[in-house]
Amino acid sequence: MAKATFDTPELKPHQEVVDLPTVKPGTMHHLKTFPAKPVHNESIGYPGELVDDWQDKAVQRLGELVEGSKALRVFLDTCVKCGACTDKCHYFLGTQDPNNMPVARQDLLRSVYRRYFTFAGKHFPKLVGAKDFDKPMLDDWYNYFHQCSQCRRCSVFCPYGIDTAEISMAAREVMDSIGVGQKYCNEILGKVHKVGNNLGLPEPALVDTLEGLEEDVEEDTGVLVRFPVDQKGADVLLITPSADFFAEPHIDGLIGYGKVFHQAGISWTLSSYASEAANFSMFIGSADNLKKTAMRIREAALELGVKRIIVGECGHAWRVAYSFWNTLIGPFDFLDPKYPVPQHIVEFTYDLIQRGALELDKEANDHRRITFHDSCNVARASRMGNIPGGQFILPREVIKAAANNFFDMAPDTIHEKTFCCGGGGGLLTDDLMELRVKGAMPRMQALKQVVEENDVNTLVAICAICKTQFAKVLPYYQFDSHMITSLHEVVGDAIQLGAKE
Amino acid sequence: MALEVNGKSIAVDEEGYLENRDDWNMDIAKAIAKEEGLDMTDAHWEVVNFLREYYDEYQIAPAVRVLTKSIGKKLGKDKGNSKYLYELFPYGPAKQACKIAGLPKPTGCV
């Protein structure tokens, strides 16, 4: 693999947030994520390659999106260029490219919208900054709308509440509709439709992997903890990102879920048909694919006859589940109304802890000094439990119940102001490594402070993308890649198997 | 894109993964390894061969954990860990070793 051809941003000692950088125009203009092949685009219902009349088709599709979403129209009409968002984006802070200021990125689409859908833009384009959708504009869209992780941190600071992610999603949908897709997202979505998960992990491989886990846990603990697949009549269907079956440290989190279910004595199952929580359709703004992908989960739940659906550690999946499932694949009248639909695994574990149903030995985690990274889609697009801010409180309370040493990062970098890991929104691909490393800088700066001041050695996250991203970028900033840990690995390590038997 | 091996042109994708798994042979594996800056030793072949066997059975590369366990069983417990595999394949056993084994790159949040 070729060595990095870019410089990793420098972190400052004893500083919690990054300074406002000087602007360096065009620094990220070269970065073009791999385009999808025709087979990838076609597998999810888009034209294979750039269509002949692409300009007209793109404008037409943009018109349909604006017509279909009053929110999108308001987001495009109301920006007054106040600048509040400019220094809130991790990609701008890390790359210094002014096109990565949220307002400038949005204006790539807004100027086109203005040209074709407003009176002033149609007749006096130059006066109002309206621009044609020509080839250079399409190229800029492709480059810079794939440098937005749709994390919505800028939206927290926007006085009008403009949701930049919606604009990035719309731009990607317009590009897909004319045959200009991104390889990473589109290839993966094709696999979900065909095999049932992002990895393309077929049922026999899933079963083999889970049997191996049962052996490992039994060897470690002397207790047989089951990891069941397609078990009809189980109480709970667990929908988790397929990275949990495959990657480190994700799989240690899966072991933790299994230990929680085991000790609580609640029957559960995975589904080989719906073996994926992730739904990358959201990243590309595709309503049709969003529904089609989510529908597998409803079908699996009905087929298996479960009473509850619990979602594993996956950031954007929780947004899709919490905010969209009911509309997309509801109603869930076949599930037990005593429980939240859907329920997050952290919420589930938290409730068990509150009821005294788990025997946790905090000292088992005494070698860990832990901080928690709020994942953007959990933090800013959903909730957990029945208390306001539960999505911030519950994960921290679960960690504190399972471990003695917990330290939060700086207030401006956590909760709703959390910084993206740098790999969200469909950008977790090697061809964007420069962006991923640079975009991780603000989070790494805040991490450095708790490492220096509190000797933190463990970074806990509840999102498969965050976990993989940190495992890859931590070494660029001189941290150990093994710092990144699944929340349920911490829980699992504290569970005293056999104590409740 | 293509890789030249023994005067033959082998189709690879943007990142150097084989387009057609059937094209694979040991010379191609060595050529890919060279591109990666690796010399193929017996230890490397052990991993690559396991990956190919696993893929033949399951149509996917094994999880890192499955791989380490299998290597541990074959070569002894001290080698059944990801540290050993990262020493052999510094960019990661899942991605780098898969490439040399002629398998598609694992996709998703991995």
Image: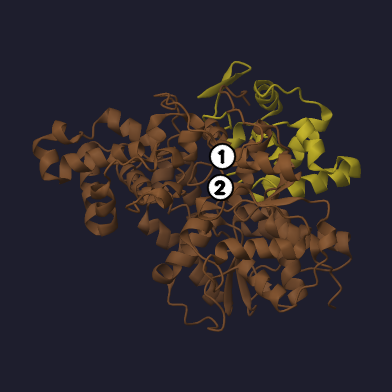
Chain colours: A brown, B yellow
- The answer to whether the residue labelled 2 contacts the one labelled 1, judged by CB atoms less than 8 Å apart, is yes
Towards the viewer: B59 or A290: A290
Residue at image location 54% in from the left, 48% down from the top: A412
- Residue bearing the label numbered 2: A413
Q: Please, is residue A171 above or below residue B22 in the view?
A: below
- Quadrant containing the N terminus of chain A is top right
Give the percent coordinates (x, y) of residue A459.
Answer: 69, 48
Horizontal and vertical percent position of residue A255: 74, 60
Regarding residue A149, the answer to whether it shows in the image is: yes
Q: Tag 2, which chain?
A: A
Q: Quadrant of residue A307?
A: bottom right
What residue appears at the point 52 percent right and 57 percent down from the top-left corner? A379
The residue indicated by pointer 1 is A17
The residue positioned farthest toward the top in the image shown: B7
- Measured as percent of width and height from the top left, residue A327 is found at 39, 70
What amino acid is at disc 1?
Answer: Val
| Labelled disc at residue A465 | none
**Which residue is at a point 37% across and 53% down the rendered structure image?**
A286
Q: Residue at x 21, y 34 (%)?
A: A131
Residue density around tag 2, few if under 14, some if 14–19, many if 20 or more, within 10 Å: many
Find residue A17 and report its image quarter: top right
Q: Amino acid at mark 2?
A: Thr
- Label located before the other in sequence (2 or 1): 1
Mark 1 surroundings within 10 Å by alpha-carbon count, few (fewer than 14), some (14 through 19), many (20 or more)? many
The chain holding disc 1 is A
Label 2 element class = helix
